[in-house]
Image (tube, coloured by chain):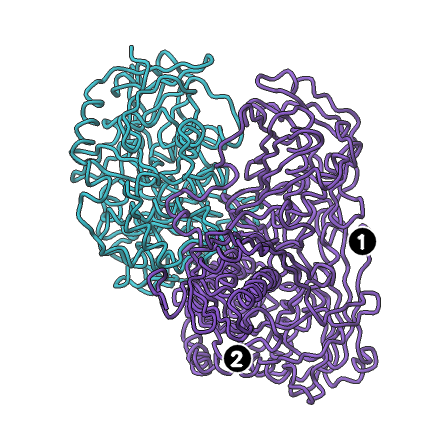
Chain colours: A cyan, B purple
Amino acid sequence: MTSAIRFILNGDDISLGDFSPTETLLDYLRLRRRLTGSKEGCAEGDCGACTVLVGRLIGGALRYESVNACIRFLGSLHGTHVVTVEHLAGKDGKLHPVQQAMVDCHGSQCGFCTPGFVMSLYGLWMANEEPSRAEIEIALQGNLCRCTGYEPIVKAAEQVATERPSALFDPIERDRAEIMAKLWTIRASSDTITVEKDGKRAIIPGTLAGLAATLEQEPSATIIAGSTDVGLWVTKQMRPINPVVFINHLTDLQTITEDETGITLGAGVTYAQALSVLEFAYPAMGRLIDRIGGAQVRNMGTIGGNIANGSPIGDMPPALIALGASVTLRSASSSRTLLLEDYFIEYGRQDRKPGEFVEKIFVPVRNEEAFFAAYKITKRRDEDISALLGAFYLTLDAEGCVETCRIAFGGMAGTPKRATSVEAALVGQPWSWNAVAAAQMSFAEDYQPLTDWRATAEYRAITARNLLTRFFLETAGQPQELVRFEPEEA
Amino acid sequence: MDNTTFDAKPVINGSVHTSLRHDSAHKHVTGSAEYIDDMPEPAGTLHAALGMADRAHADILSLDLSAVKAAPGVVAVITASDIPGVNDVSSNGSHDEPLLATDKVEFHGQPIFVVIGQTRDAARRAARLAKIEYRDLPHWTDIKGAQANGAPLVITPMTLKRGEPETEMQKAPLRLQGQMEIGGQEHFYLESQIALAIPGEDEDVTIWSSTQHPTEVQHMVAHVLACANHAVTVNTRRMGGGFGGKETQGAHFACLAALAAKKLNRAVKFRPDRDEDMAVTGKRHDFRVDYELGFDEEGRIHAVDATFAARCGFSSDLSGPVTDRALFHADSSYFYPHVHLTSQPLKTHTCSNTAFRGFGGPQGMLGGERFIEEIAYAVGKDPLDIRKLNFYGQPGSGRTLTPYHQEVEDNILLQLVEELEASSDYRARRQAIIDYNENSPVIRKGIALTPVKFGISFTMTAFNQAGALVHVYSDGSIHLNHGGTEMGQGLYTKVAQVVADAFNVDIERVKITATTTGKVPNTSATAASSGSDLNGMAAYDAARQIKERLVEFACGKWQVEAKDVEFLPNRVRIGSETISFDALVKAAYFGRVQLSAAGFYKTPKIHWDRAAGRGRPFYYFAYGAACSEVSIDTLTGEYLMDRTDILHDVGKSLNPVIDIGQIEGAFVQGMGWLTTEELWWDAKGRLRTHAPSTYKIPLASDRPKIFNVKLADWSENREPTIGRSKAVGEPPFMLGISVLEALSMAVASIADYTVCPKLDAPATPERVLMAVERMKAM
């Protein structure tokens, strides 16, 4: 049994066996390493002041992603390269081009959010030499600034995009080969790592079979993938969770396969990874995923986690339900597949038995004749939890009547839920404004939404009806949706 | 002449009126700028966490802290009984704000005790273990509830009256009544409140506090510890944002840290979690404005009568001057021939609302702009025409007197607004939008051009004073200190420019140092946009004194007259000879010249009689205007910011890039206040929008897609302020009002612009949709 995790922090090789299972990367950096450039602004993955890059091996490549150190647990860093703001400038103090652009464009005022912005911009700079304004805004969705109004930061991103000094200057490019080699070495072992501190255990299985075996022995363990939800149990609710099982490093859970029947996503596939394949099959999915959390959350959070945690909102479940997706649950001894809509039983209760974990999600292949849309409604357009989310899937028969109709909403009930009465009112009817108007009355039978800080019940009810209108207009070739960037600008 | 010892450059680096980057920019981007939580902790530092009430209004029947004390890592638990001095942190001396609640709690989240732990984590976990028995009392959290329950006022209200509003209202050709609700706002400084207290010998304690008001923190700590002010030193190098939220609100954490530090003789750091910070600290006041307007068919205002009711929270804090400033700005940019305005500062069972950029002014102005909108829809005109019709006039026009009897002497509204009207192509775009809306069933657009006129000075006249301390060391390097604090607004940079400019030396010679009560005493808060006006002048005064001594010394040593001593860039011409600045300083040291000076400034001309509602509370006005265009989705109420053009007056700018940064940031913050930033308390009185996951400030993608910001570079302050500049911190916040009005126009299109939509703030997508539904029902 191994009892230490190994990772690289900036230029240092770290082997760490002395940590609490819920110790965050941010606390480790600030309190134990005195790397105080990364800040705590919210401790819930929403402000981005703690943004660092984490490099990991994906396929044959070493890819760096921005993440929120405040809700990232140390146990999730095995086999990664953590890069903080302190690593960017040259040893002679010369600023990295991304930093220099922020200075030149006056992108900092109070400066507290600035290291986080620098790291998000650095991640963008590395991945994209010609970012559009739309891409810059997407990359910055997870970073809050209260001083500047963002204009100079966006300008810095544009200004620096083309500045590519010699590779040796960039700390990651300079050491890329060496880092890859080290990470491969760490990954070579598939032993389960167990770290124990003060009676609390972090278990890091090396394989999928190891995960199944671990969960058989520890059926009450908390599984942590992206920690974008569980992170808050710790930082906000201070809930004692023990033991924890980390799965984010399991490449077997990160596979994406496509065949003639559809797309299969491993449960550990992040939103960011799912985006590329799903947006191609279903463009509306791409637009939806771009508005889930910020970039950091999409780099950490997983499709499987979004389902497993049973949120009444989603955002993926209602969209996946409308697409007729299914989910496969696995344990040491069994594997079963069920429709995703059947997984959600009631608020706080899902059809997952002790010892089971979500293994994969299957999304049926796109029917070229079908219409699909997903509308996320929020108070703030980006990086906000939905007040409601409506997803619509529709096929028409030769006569133009509704053949198949799956409508699912998040935020309207205790679980992501289908609008069966509305669907029933539509199926067999001509897909017409009259049929839509009549069916809208049935929403009241399907949903009795609540009032909370995101919206009143009344707003949710009106908007749900109106989203069917929006879908109808869209299928009629008259899309009526606010568009910040035209396709050519994006 | 010996040129070898200095560089005979034509101009210095960093003089006033030049664009200079923020002094900490390099440190910001490398993560090396030190905030209090980044400082190395003294050995043995302990950490504090709050024990908070979970009732909105209740008697405390019993407090059992045994489980808290027994929790692992707990060193001590502090309650009100540990306070040697006064259990009060009310900033206005009204003794209505206990540091720790004793027998009664008055808002959900009110601090009752403090846990001191070996680690922050241990303290936070233990703080939840208290067993508290309460007897609930009736509570109300909003203005409606306060009025329904006959809530007391937290402070004496103010009334402004001029002319004969009662009779003129009756005589007006047209009249209407209305009501507007205006939401509050969380500051959401990125760095939460924090204090580090380090005990010293005797009664001494040194505190690093993230505060806009080190002097007040000093006084509060002394008050709580029952020691003299001289025992307490408060230091502030920089804040990670303030926006008014650290004017009085930092004192609680500093006092509790100091109390624990002195009791335990250990350093104590107090950094609340974001959720706790948001639950405990005050915010921008919500308002409800009830108004009656008298006007004519042209849209000219005859009389205004309005009551501004405010949610003040459980104590008075700054609610008096905040509600006063709301009334001072209820005229927005308009002349009210007859006017009666009154404030209603209501007590509610919520955190005690406080200063926030604009300090009540934005709420007052928003009311004034609603009046204009109402009249415009009533008479069927473009609101911009109604605005221009009602602008204050030029001296001699008979239309220059404010409701508080101050003359508007420096009015540049019309020039500014007409320049923006032309440069933004307002008229043509408005027509194009009207045409677009006719043919767009779901997506509607709106545009609005709104002005800003903001009064500069603390309305408490005494606060308009400042001090600075400047040392010139014998190597010619300069140490600068003043009472102003740096929260990102660039004050330190601007004041350093003033000093560099005064000595005519490169700014690199000027060392900016942390604000401390030990160097400059009895300072005012860095607030009311006054930072550079006050501290710039005080620093200039200090530099002037040293310069005068240097000139006098040079006259004696080189036998020249004062007019023959000239400070050139980094050098000094003395008669026909030129020597480096350093050489003069060194010579002056050997000549036993005092090379250190304390500077002082007090704003002239101002006076205010609150009871009479008369005086000149403001030294001058700052102006601006914004034109915003938006699109809304009438199915969901969602919207997009399409374009904003701004023309803003900062007088003769001390630093154009810093001023532009203030304007852009303030606009977006103002826009956030009026759109997505919504505070929501549940029936139990809990604030449920207590973190960025639930409270939504603007993101990069919320800023206007096209964003043109320009300084009115032809403007100069008519008053002799530092460099003829004008204050910039708060005024541009109110440029955000253009967004609310543009949204309103888009909504109004549903009823063909015949009905004022009365879109309240914040105009969340829900509020927009509900307004659309109202218009559809017309």
Q: Position of residue A165 (x, y in %)?
A: 20, 51
Asked if the residue under mark 2 is in contact with the one under mark 1, i.e. CB atoms within 8 Å, the reply is: no
Which residue appears farthest toward the bottom when viewing the image? B396
Q: Nearer the viewer, mark 1 or mark 2?
A: 2
Picture quarter with the C terminus of chain A: bottom left
Give me the residue at 67% from left, 50% from top.
B521
Q: Position of residue A308 (x, y in %)?
A: 39, 30
Chain bearing mark 2: B
Q: Can you give x and y, in whole percent of width and height, for residue B265 in the image?
A: 65, 25
Amino acid found under the numbered disc labelled 1: Leu
Q: Which mark is residue B153?
A: 1
Task: Work out whether A313 lies above or below B125.
Answer: below
Chain letter of mark 1 equals B
Residue A420 visible (yes or no):
no
Q: Secondary structure at mark 2?
A: helix
Judge whether B366 appears above or below A126 on screen. Answer: below
Q: Residues within 10 Å of mark 1 (few under 14, many from 20)?
A: many
Q: Earlier in the sequence, mark 1 or mark 2?
A: 1
Residue B416, labelled with which disc?
2
> Within the image, what quadrant is residue B111 found in?
top right
Q: Is residue B5 left or right of residue A64?
A: right
**Do the residues marked 1 and 2 share a common chain?**
yes
What amino acid is labelled 2 in the image? Leu
Tell me the crowding category of disc 2: few under 14, some 14 to 19, or many 20 or more residues within 10 angstroms, Cα based.
many
Q: Of B696 and B36, which appears nearest the observer?
A: B36
Q: Quadrant of the N terminus of chain A?
A: top left
Residue depicted at x 69% and y 89% = B396
Q: In the image, is B622 to the left or to the right of B430?
A: right
